[in-house]
Amino acid sequence: AGTAGMPMRAVLEGSNLFGAIVVVTRYFGGIKLGTGGLVRAYSALTRAVLEEAQMEELVEGLTLLVRRVPAAQVSSLYRCMGQLGDVHFAADGTAEADIWVPQRDVTQLRKELMSLGQVEIEERPGDQG
């Protein structure tokens, strides 16, 4: 009847939220609200939820699996990755890291990592932060 989903969607879109959902469960309490009353109720509930919600931006990214970083370049590896990953050491003494990177920064970080020497970089797509 357009009394719940459309008004809720209008509030979400009016708040520039796309791809978000709000679930409202209404129990009939014996009073018929009518079309206008239902629209106002669902809209008000959606606004109330948005006021209380803690919003986080969903950032598309991927994980770079970095291998064979020379031991002499480990400090540079830490500088490149900041707080974005963990470094481990392989049996041959080279460093390895799994680094989550926002999609917008992949090209620049890849260039910085390649400057560390003969490193191997593999991409694992589909991660979000």
Image (cartoon, grey):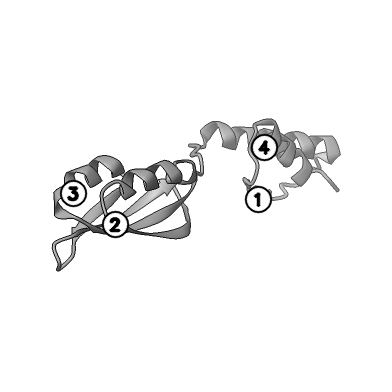
Image position, residue 6 (x, y; %) = 78, 42
Q: Residues within 10 Å of mark 3 (few under 14, many from 20)?
A: some
What residue is shown with label 1? Answer: 25
What residue is shown with label 2? Answer: 119
Image position, residue 66 (x, y; %) = 31, 57
Instruction: Tell me what residue is drawn at x 30 percent, y 44 percent.
Output: 81
What residue is shown with label 3? Answer: 74
Residue lying at the far bottom in this picture: please name it.
91
- The reply to whether the C-beta atoms of the residues labelled 3 and 2 are less than 8 Å apart is no
For marks 1 and 4 on the same chain, the one whose residue lies earlier in the sequence: 4
- The reply to whether the C-beta atoms of the residues labelled 1 and 4 are less than 8 Å apart is no
What separation in Å lies between label 1 and label 4 (alpha carbons)? 17 Å
Label drawn at residue 62: none
Q: Secondary structure at mark 3?
A: helix
Q: Nearer the viewer, residue 66 or 126?
A: 66
What residue is shown with label 4? Answer: 12
What separation in Å lies between label 4 and label 2 (alpha carbons)? 46 Å
For marks 2 and 1 on the same chain, the one whose residue lies earlier in the sequence: 1
Q: Residues within 10 Å of mark 1 (few under 14, many from 20)?
A: few
